Amino acid sequence: MNTLTASTAIQAGKVQLVTFRRRSLTTARWRVLWVALGFALVAMIALLRVISFGLSDTGVSRTSLEEALLPERGEITDRNGQPLARVYPAYALWFNPKALGDGGAPLVKSAQNVARELKAIFPTLNEGRVATQLASGKAGYIRRRVLPEEANAVHELGEIALEMPRENDRHYPQGSMAAHILGYVAADGHGRVGMERVLDEQLLDPSLRGEPVPLSIDVRAQGALEDELRRGMKLVDAKGAAGIILDVDTGEVMALASLPEFDPNRIDAEGQSRMFNRVTNQVYELGSTFKPLTVAAAIDAGVIRDLGEPWNARTVRVGTIERSDSPYKGATLNIPQALAYSSNTVTMRVANELGPERMRQTMIDLGMSQRPHIELPAKGYPIWPGDNWSKLTNMTVGYGHGIAVTPLHLASAYATMVNGGIWRPATLRKLEEGEAPEGRRVFKASTSSQMRQLMRMIAIYGTGKNANAPGFRVGGKTGSAEKPSKGGYRETSLVSTFAAAFPMDKPRYVVVAMLDEPRGTLASSYQRTAAWNAAPIVGRLIPRVGPVLGVRPDETRDVDISDLKSLITGSY
């Protein structure tokens, strides 16, 4: 009986064990199934979410954490991504007189001694002003933009009241380069003067500031332009200089410089005085650089049909006013000779034949009657002769007097003259392929073709010889104009300009270099005119910037000017 009971109990235990195992297995299978269904559901939701984003016009918004990690102000770069303006974490030096409590003295040493020790760390510090600030017990900044090694030196002074808070600082890694393009950021966090002001809203927008804003300029070309302008300015002891490199087909500014420059990293009284932009804000009478524009308008209107036709080059008399060429080159000159020699008298007669209405309309079409077209806020108003041009006004404008414009006006006009005749506004924004504005037609394509020949001829045989960089097929025109003053012109004060384009067989870029009040020095053979000071700047600049902008020298190619050469033979 006991044996049977034991056997039955064992059998029952086995059955229970098997049942338990089956239930456990079933439970495990259901759990796996539920987990799998859960993963499938999550995957389905994610897939539907992705599909919904793909079909929706709205993207994923930034989270608050992502926005917190963004810089306080967006970055500005050149066209190739080189940083021009960005935000960096930095130290500042702050005086906190309550660092040791309300009852204790703020400084361990005297204010004079602490100021002296700070002066040893920061040589440009105003020791007297700092000593006064420390002695007054008034909290405030002593210095912004403190380097880490300088911060360590301050800590070693052992003054608890000298605190080193970390702040975000707008920094310009290229220093003063492109300062007049960029501008700067003021203490209130908003941009001033240049593209910092123009792009202020975009650079501060959290939804946009994660992406750098590319400008049209190339830092390599910008550096070369500033370097050559600075060199040319020093060689002839000029008061200032300005220059621009412009893409003739798109209007993009590859480089723009005004000297003397300022450093946007350190705005002081001297920097404030140098913020005036000579390229976009200062208007000048640009003299003989206007003569090719007058000739182009006359060719376009049919006033000039035969370049070899002789024109009267004797003294021009309008009422009591007389104008003559100096030195005298003969009683008659044809158009190539007049441009190569830079004849005022022939150009005045060409303008007279063209007439005030047609000359005035050409200047309007070239944008000369309005402020220059560019994003920068500082743009000068031209000195425009008005609506009704007299005979003398028209003839005077023909050779670049009686009208004052900016160097940017001139650059845009030259781009129009050589690119096939289409005027386009200048821009500092990088344009993608196909984004160039349609523009407006000013000259016929055939006129533009003739002007390319004439401009190349001037650089080979005329006043532009010193800009004729081998292999780059440069064409251009000099201009030297006396500055106006009360009662006439100041003979001792010149504005010296050279406007050029290259390569003239297929123009890509216009280059304008201007010197304000150059002097005759040994470097310029004691001459003050553009042929001796502005033209050499362009002659040195183009070989430097050409290759980086995609134009390599090629002495096997050139513009065919054989017919023009025969017209000027014997004159030079």
Image (cartoon, grey):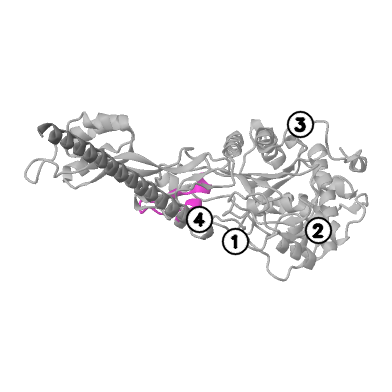
In this view, the residue farthest toward the left is 103
Q: What residue type is labelled 1?
A: Tyr
Mark whose residue sits in front, 4 or 1: 4
Q: Element at badge 1?
A: loop
Query: Which residues lie in the magenta part?
Result: 179-200
Q: Contact (CB < 8 A) between labels 4 and 2? A: no
Residue 532: name its quadrant.
top right
Q: Quadrant of the C terminus?
A: top right
Q: Name the residue under label 2.
A: 297
76 versus 305 height, above or below: above
In this view, the residue farthest toward the bottom is 388
Of callouts 3 and 4, which one flags the residue occurring earlier in the amino acid sequence?
A: 4
Q: Element at badge 4?
A: helix
Where residue 434 appears, as percent x and y from the top left, is 68, 52
Of callouts 2 and 1, which one flags the residue occurring earlier in the amino acid sequence?
A: 2
Q: Name the residue under label 4.
A: 51
